[in-house]
Structure formats: structure tokens, C-alpha cells
Amino acid sequence: MSIEQPGLFGLSETKKLESPEEGREEQSLAYIPFIPGVKPQEAYLELNSLSQLEQRAKSCRQCRLREGCRQVVFGEGNSDARLMLVGEGPGMDEDLQGRPFVGKAGQLLDKILQAAELPRQEVYIGNVVKCRPPGNRLPHPDEVRVCRNYLEAQIRIIKPRILVCLGSLATKAIIDPQVSITMTRGKWFNRQGISIMAVFHPAALLRNPSYKRPTWEDFKQIRDKYYR
Ligand code: SF4
């Protein structure tokens, strides 16, 4: 499956904008969201920096997840990252610390990144939903639907060259709701100039060590593309 669309994020760079008001309208009309199903008018197009977006997310109460978590875990890393990794949502440790991938799964991800010579400080790491689902349950579809607007904006602002979906939920949210992680992992997709690959979630590797070998093969591909 290959999804090719002209230009990064579908924004016309040559379009002449008559006035600030018309500009906003034209940009919103011309904008083709990266994530299928996101509506341009909901994609926070007026926010052009990660710090603005983070401020917005930190005061967000658009879904029930905010009621049950300690804090919003927005994401962290290099705002100019060539590689962006997206997981499912914060767990208990992430909720406590306000940082993504800091628990056991995060420590395993750190080891994988280190082995693949992909320094964590050079990449950007985030999640599909920014607030911890109670009891670490899977985020519900309506929660994913509303929170993916932040992810869409993060991708638009960072403009990574490589996007890695960590686990099934991120794969369905970003690549295609119909695909399964086992069928999709390890394959490259291309959308709007960004190479996308799904890999098993590090938490799945902790539960099922037989996933470690294929995941390492996938990260070798990611490393090769990153340094190419
Ligand atoms: S999960 Fe996302 S949409 Fe829901 S309250 Fe948190 S930041 Fe807002």
C-alpha cells in the first residue's frame, strides 16, 4: 500500500495570500491532513510551534481521559527531528513524570534506539493520546478521534522524514484503521514525503520476547533510512 500525495502536508508554497484573514481561509482549505480522517479545521492550523501546541494541550479537557490522569503528557524531543516515534498513550510512569516512554517499555525503547545508533535526544517521541487512560486500558475511538488533532499538528510542525508507529493503536490511527500490526510491521509506506513504518510496541516485546528479533530487523531498516 502506498499513499502518494504531492508536497509535504499538501500546503501550496507558491499560493499568494491576499490578506491575513483570506490567508487563514486559503491555508485551511488547501491543507491536506497527514492523518486520515482529521478535518483541516480541527487540526490546530493556527498554532505553529510545539510550545504553543503544548500549552493548548495542557489545558485541554476535550475528552474524559483528562479527568482520570495526573497530567497531560504532550511528547518530547528534538523539534527538528528527522525521526518521530508515536506510541499509544501514557502509562502510570509517564503520567507521574509527565514524559513519554519512561517506564519499563520506555527503557526497552531506549535500549533499542541505542543499539540502532539513534540517539533519543535527536528524535521526537509522542503518543496518539496525551492523557493516561484509566487502568492502562486502550483509548476509546472517540478519545483517539479528538486527540489525534494534536498529533496531526505535531507532525505538521516537526515535519519528520521518518515516522515510526509503535504498536497497533498508532498503526491504525496513522496508517489505516483496517490494517493489523502483524501484517503491516516492517514495511515502508510513503505519505506526503514522509516514510512510515509500523513496529511492535516495546510493551509487546516485554510480554512476548519472540517479537524482539523482528523488531530489531525493523529498527535496522529504520536506522539505514535515517542515515542514508
Ligand atoms: S487525551 Fe487529548 S483530547 Fe483528551 S483531554 Fe487529553 S489532551 Fe485533550
Image (cartoon, rainbow, N blue to C red):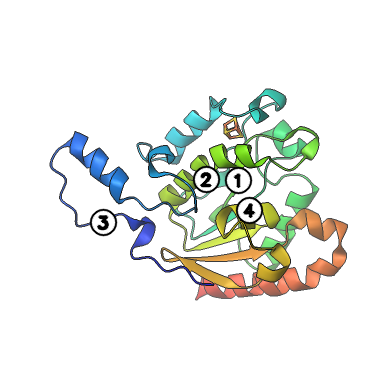
For the residues labelled 4 and 1, say whether their Cβ atoms are less than 8 Å apart.
yes
Q: CA distance from mark 3 to mark 1?
A: 27 Å
Marks 2 and 4, the one that precedes in the sequence = 2
| Tag 4 residue | 170
Residue 208, given in percent of the width and then of the height, sits at: 86, 62
Residue 92, given in percent of the width and then of the height, sits at 77, 36
Q: Which mark is residue 209?
A: none
Task: Report whether 102 appears left or right of 40.
Answer: right
Q: Name the kind of residue labelled 1 in the image.
A: Val
Q: Secondary structure at mark 1?
A: loop
Q: Earlier in the sequence, mark 4 or mark 1?
A: 1
Quadrant for residue 89, please give it: top right
Going from the N terminus, do you reach mark 1 or mark 2 first? Answer: 1
Q: Which residue is mark 3?
A: 12
- Residue at disc 2, CB closer than 8 Å to ligand 1: no
Quickly name the residue at label 1: 128
Residue behind mark 2:
151
